[in-house]
Image (cartoon, rainbow, N blue to C red):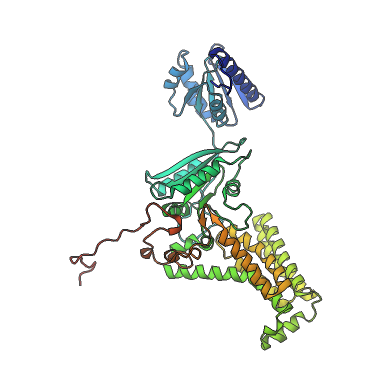
Amino acid sequence: MRFFKGRKKTDAAAFQVTSKDFQELLKKFEASNDFLTFQFPNEDGYTISYFSSLISEQQLHEQVLAVISNQTKKDLKQLKSDIPMEDMKVTTDINVIQRLVLAGSILIQYKKDDEMCLLIPCAHSVKRQTSIPESEYTVAGPKEAFVESLDTNLNLIRNRLPIPELQSKEFRVGSISQTRLVVLYIDGIVNQQIIHTVMQRIDDIEYDTIVDISFVNQMITDNRNSMFPQLIDTERPDHLASVLSEGKIGIMLDGSPHALVGPNTIISFFSSFEDYFQIWNLGTSFRLIRLFAVLFSVLSSPLYVAVLTYHYLVIPTDLLPILISSRGVIPFPPILEAIVLEGTIELLREAAVRLPAKVGSTIGIVGGIVIGTAAVEAGFVSNVLLMLVALAALASFTVPIYQISNTIRLIRFPFLIAAQLYGLFGLALCSAFILSHLLKLTSLGSPYLDPLYPLRIYDFKDSLIRLPFSKQTKRPQFLRTEKPLRIRRKEETNNSQSDIDE
């Protein structure tokens, strides 16, 4: 029964208030055409109500109506013991009734006006089968990706981490959607302060409808105005299971085929999970190539504008004839042609993403070739800048995490403006602003620039470079885990024998 604060009610008064609320709830349900109510097995039988769009009719007929039709009328508690189903509830709590009926439960009343209800879970869920990852595809490694069903996603994680220390804490987010949200972590490893921080921020979410994990991402990050993502969005169960064992936390939402991972450092966004499926020297090489590609993608066009506008004396003598011939007929300054080309690349990207897959890939390739060639022949842009912009766009595709690639796409334009205003000094000034922002940025309270700042030498073993697993004996220091040790070395004894008899 529900009571109002500040007033004392008798049991009879409380019953009247609860009964009124219950009838109002039923009226709201009955206003929908897919809400059905009928008497079964006859006019003096039970009152059965449910949303036909949410329940499984096969379960209703085979496991509920078949049992009721073959016995005399009993009270709800006895009926509950006769029906061979789990998680049934007999309650008068309106909040529980509303939540379970809207989740696909059948409501059974002994009489039509009774408050006491038996709720039988009979939900009909439409689930997509697990498929291969799309945004984090790897040649080696597992080929499973999360789906929209939270229970299926939890199953994928628990199959990879079959330990009782794997804890899941469930929340309901969204005042209207009431979406299920789960926080995953390994008890005994994770830093409890991080767990308390995440749970407090989830409790503080005040929004009516949460339909995707990206909504939660924007609401619980440390700095909501930063262009740099602080939580990684992953669709790979193996990735989530791996970082949980490191001492990180995972957040999954029902209806979203992605999970959030944190805390993270900026290096985490340039590390592909495929790096761990290869030998350490190859993984390190590819990781360094990505970092170089990102720097080239951001700085190539601004350097072109800065050098041609202010610092043309630094151009090598052998390169001057090429630049003069390419820009001899261009009527626009370097900044304008750079913005035109960068804007054209962004338009082609957006067009390719919004169109169907087969048409989008064709538009991206053909449109880039046709527009680029026509712009050079018409004298709007130089062929040197066209080559630099094309290489910069290609370099930006090497980033394995989609969220940071959007940041790289946008961060070029402040550098272009700074290069036009102050040349190389402007590039240095813009870099200083971004670096100062990154120094202050945190991910769930952990420093974003670790291990560069604060300097942690040990964390370099899996940051800019990736050393062998035998060298990564401890978990990352910035996570401040309860159990830092990952590998327990066996004590070498004099009686040890070689694997092969010599």
Question: Is residue 140 rendered to the left or right of residue 417?
Answer: left
Give the image location of residue 45, x and y in percent: 53, 13
**Viewer can see residue 112:** no
Give the image location of residue 91, x and y in percent: 50, 22
Name the image quarter holding the C terminus.
bottom left
**Furthest-front residue in this view:** 6
Closer to the camera, 4 or 101? 4
**Viewer can see residue 321:** yes
Residue pictured at 51% horizontal, 52% vertical: 261
Figure check: 43 above or below 448? above
**Furthest-top residue in this view:** 44
Give the image location of residue 434, x and y in percent: 62, 64
Q: How many marks?
A: 0
**Furthest-right residue in this view:** 331
Closer to the camera, 353 or 118? 118
Rendering quarter of residue 359 = bottom right
**Furthest-left residue in this view:** 495
Figure check: 83 above or below 449? above
Residue pictured at 54% horizontal, 68% vertical: 290
Question: Is residue 389 rendered to the left or right of residue 185?
Answer: right
Figure check: 84 above or below 336? above
Give the image location of residue 129, x and y in percent: 52, 45
Rendering quarter of residue 402 = bottom right
Figure check: 390 above or below 273? below
